[in-house]
Amino acid sequence: MDTLIQAQGLTLRYGRKTAIDDVSFSVPKGRVVGLLGHNGAGKTSLMKALVGLLPCTGNLTVLGMAPMADRVRLLEELSYIPDVAILPRWARVEQLITLMSGLHPRFSAERARTLLKRTSVKPTDKVKTLSKGMVAQVHLALMAAVDARLMILDEPTLGLDVLSRKAFYEMLIDEWCDGERSVLVSTHQVEEIETLLSDVLMLNEGKLVLSISLEEVDRRFVALSHDPAQADAIAAAHPLLRYRVQGGTAALFDGPPPEHVQALGQRVRPSLVDLFVALTRAPEMNRTQG
């Protein structure tokens, strides 16, 4: 199966509030997809729909299955770490491995122990004695030891320091991603994981404003670094965003600007943060940041 997630016209409501509004996208195998959005944009609701925790309208298949109807079978081939993931504080790490061995038919205790050797966590450690970063690594080791094809991570490194976040993502990329499996991860630490991503989905108030590969980002979006004296001429070309860069000012365009505008500046690579700001901020906020 080459397409692991297929969503068409996906809509999810809480009473009168629309959390996900007519969203369509697909996730092929072998991809690391970043799900970006402000708080309340619908990221967690979307992830819960993907794992069958929330009902939605539209057409949705995950690993060829309907998440609500086939949830038990789906969770045998999917790993999920929610944003409020909690491990029992009283348990020792080895007890968690034993528990998972009895709960999940595709869990490998040997694999979990091998992954934990990458960390400073010992099998005899109790969860309550571990730091937040260590708990996150234990949780990832348990999930990565499941023979799954898709992993869904909702803010997995929230509240962790930079070293713990780095260790988490290194384990994820080195030990789980193999060119066949895919990861969908939501995060606010966009700068830290941008180099790990192959694709990005951007949500804004429940709507999908961008679904694109990182390769296509470089082809489609153009950022020009320019002298402040050229600001008026650049603004006349209606960029998506004008913003500060080191040593000057830049403008971001969807597609190449006219040749006479390109001649006014030097092309630079737009970051995902700049692109996210451009596509999700209010129009009246689209001005040069001081």
Image (cartoon, helix red, strand yellow):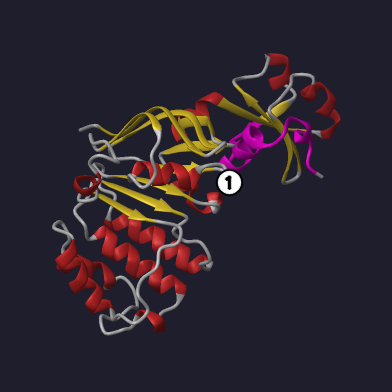
Q: Residue at x 53, y 68 (%)?
A: 161
Residue 284 x/y as whole percent: 78, 32
In the image shown, does 111 or 178 lie closer to the viewer? 111
Assign the C terminus to one quadrant of the image. Answer: top right
Quadrant of residue 170 within the rendered picture: bottom left
The residue lying toward the viewer, choosing from 169 and 46, is 46
Q: Is residue 22 above or below residue 288?
A: above
Kind of residue at badge 1: Gly
Q: Is residue 183 above or below residue 263?
A: below
User: Which span is picked out in magenta?
Assistant: 267-289
Which residue is situated farthest in the front direction here?
15
Percent coordinates x, y for residue 28 in the rendering: 31, 34
| Image point (23%, 36%), residue name | 65
Tell me if residue 87 is in the magenta stretch: no
Looking at the image, is 139 positioned above or below residue 191? below
Would you say 226 lies left or right of 81 here? right
Could you say where residue 107 lies in the image, as x and y percent from the top left?
A: 17, 60
* Among the 4 quarters of the image, the one containing residue 265: top right
**At which x and y percent is residue 206?**
54, 36
Q: Is residue 106 left or right of residue 180?
A: left
